[in-house]
Image (cartoon, helix red, strand yellow):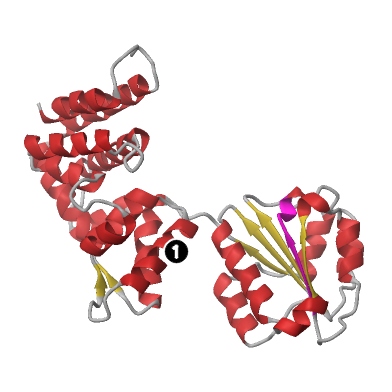
Amino acid sequence: MAKQETSYEQILTDLRKKTYSPVYFLMGEEPYYIDYLSDFIQNNVLNETEKEFDQTILYGKDVDINTVINAAKRYPMMSPYQVLIIKEAQLIKDWDNLVHYLSNPLKSTILVFCYKYGTPDKRKKWFQELQKTAVIYESVKLRDYEIEAWISRFCKSKNVGIDDKAVAMLKDFLGTDLSKLVNELDKLVLTKPADMPRITPDLVEKNIGISKDYNVFELQAALISRDVLKANRIIQYFSENKKANPMVLVLAQLFKFFSELMLYHYLPDKSQGAVASELKINPYFVKDYQKASQVFGAWKTMNIISYIRETDARYKGIDNPSTDEADLLIELIYKILH
C-alpha cells in the first residue's frame, strides 16, 4: 500500500528526533523547502569527522541511477549512517533500475533525492515502489495570494512582528520567490534594533532598498485618492529607478488590483471578512477596495483593465514604435484618473 506524502513539518520533526528513513524523495516546483530539508540532513545527521568518511554529495547531471545505487549500497565507516544526497536529481534519466534498490534499501544509508522544479511521472513503476518505502515530500509553489500570510508566519516563527504595509512592500518587490524572501527577512531580523518589536516600512526601505513612498502599493493609493501629483511623482521615480521598478511588474500589480476591484463590485456580501475571503487578501486591505469602488465604478474599472492591457501590449512593442516606459505610464495614469 502506498504511503501518504509527508508534510514538511513532520519530516523536520522526525529529523530533529533523529528518526531517519532510508530514502527521502524531495520534489516540486518550490525549491526552498527542498533545499532546507536536504541542508538540514547534510548539516545535522553526521558530525564533521563522520562527514569526511560517510557523507557524499552527487549531482544528477554527473551520474546515472546505477551509480547512485552502487553508492547507496556502501556501508558506513565511522558512524551508524552513510548520508548520500543527490542534488539536481531531475536531471537523472534512467530511473527504472531504482526499483531493485527500493525493494530492499540499506538501513544504514540515508539516501536523499532533490528533484526540483517539477515532479516525475507518478505512474511509473519505480515511483509506485518509491511510495511504498520512501518519505516523499512535494514542495508546492505558493500562489500570489498566499505570500502575505506566509511572510507573517515566518516573522512570527522568529518572534518578530511585521507591519501590513511592510508585508505588502516585500510581496510586491520580491514576489513568490521564497528563497529571496527568506534572505531579505533574515536580513531585517538581524538588522532590526533590539528595542524594535516589529519590522516596519522604514526598516524595509533602509535595509532592502525598497522605497516606502515610491512603490506600486503607494501608486495604487495615489490613484484611489485621485492624487495626480503624487501619482506622477511615483512614475517619475519609477522611470529613474527601472531596475527596482520594472514596467512589467508595475503593470502586473495594477492589473491584479483592478481585476480584483472588478470582482469586488459584484460581490453580494461586501463585509470585511467576506471580501477578504473571496479576493484572498489580507483583511487590512479591504478598505482600499471599498474606497476604490467609490472612485471607480464598475464600468470605469472595466475600461481601466482595458487601458492596462493596451499599455502592456504597447510596452512589448505592439503598435508602439517609439514611446518610452515613462510616457506610457504617464498616459496610463491620465486615462485612469480622467
Q: Is residue 337 above or below residue 260?
A: above
Residue 306 location, quadrant: top left
Whole-percent x and y of residue 284?
21, 60
**Residue visible at 33% across and 33% down in the picture:** 247
Residue bearing mark 1: 182
Whole-percent x and y of residue 69?
89, 64
Image quadrant in which the N terminus is located: bottom right
Which residue type carries mark 1? Answer: Val
Whether residue 126 appears in this view of the structure is: yes
* Secondary structure, magenta segment, majority class: strand
Q: Relative to residue 334, is residue 283 drawn left or right?
A: right
Q: Is residue 124 above or below residue 186?
A: above
Whole-percent x and y of residue 4?
67, 69
Q: Is residue 167 above or below residue 211?
A: below
Image quadrant in which the C terminus is located: top left
Stretch of the chain drawn in magenta? 82-90
Q: Relative to residue 256, is residue 144 drawn left or right?
A: right
